Amino acid sequence: MPTCKHKPCAVLPAFKGEIGTPKISFYPAQLWDGPEGRWRIMIGDRWVRRQGESRSFFTLDGVTSLVMDHLRSGLGLPVEQPGILPDTKKATPVTFVPQDPGEPLLNTWTRTEPFKDQHGEWRVWVFHKQNPVLLDDLVPREDRRAA
């Protein structure tokens, strides 16, 4: 049973009722030398980790997705799969949704297959961006060229 010597920065209480769920605790990633603006998450007494990672740090979009999946589970609804998976193929049509509110949406395609960066975050190269972007910042879209 994992424990944490750090105090969480936020806690969502357990959902009670017919199904119920454990509580969710959020910790700033910097407590483990992770990137600023990311969080480590514990559901009940277990750390949330991506497959193949010893520690996973999540962006705000990732946190939102985890919370929504947790809520769906507590309501007895099916949990949705993430929009862009690490096994996404090259040339997949996507929309880049930037974290910076001043930056516009960008309809583009993946230039490579996703890979993990030095912080263990999944990224992919897309057209019209000079740096690889987080998978969490992408949503799938239909390819209108294929119609």
Image (tube, rainbow, N blue to C red):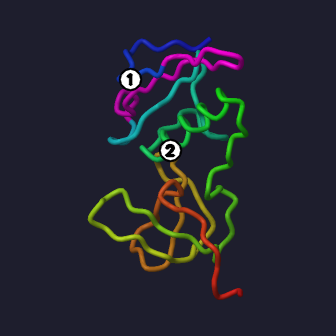
In the rendered view, does 62 fall on the left or right side of 100?
right
Image quarter of the C terminus: bottom right
Residue 104 vs residue 27, the one in the foreground: 104
Q: Secondary structure at mark 1?
A: strand
Residue 2, position as x, y percentages in the image: 57, 14
**Circle nearer the N terminus (1, 2):** 1
- Which of the numbered marks, if any, corresponds to residue 10? 1
Dot 1, crowdedness within 10 Å: few (<14), some or many (≥20)? few
Quadrant hosting residue 20: top right
Please provide percent x and percent y for residue 22.
60, 18
Task: Give the answer, above or below, for where 79 lies relative to 139.
Answer: above
Q: Nearer the viewer, residue 70 or 1?
A: 70
- Look at the picture and state if 118 lies above or below 111: above
Name the residue located 68 percent from the left edge and 49 percent from the top edge: 81
Circles 1 and 2 in contact, beta carbons < 8 Å: no
Does residue 32 show up magenta in the picture?
Answer: yes
Which residue corresponds to the image point at 40% horizontal and 37% vertical from the top-left?
Answer: 34
The disc label shown at residue 62, or none: 2
Q: Dot 2 lies on which element? A: helix
Q: Is residue 55 above or below residue 116?
A: above
Q: Which kind of residue does numbered mark 2 sit on? A: Gly
Q: Position of residue 97 (x, y in %)?
A: 44, 63
Q: Nearer the viewer, residue 19 or 63?
A: 19
Q: Is residue 60 left or right of residue 88?
A: left
Which region is colored magenta?
13-33
**Label 1 – label 2 distance at C-alpha:** 15 Å
Question: The N terminus lies in which quarter of the figure?
Answer: top right
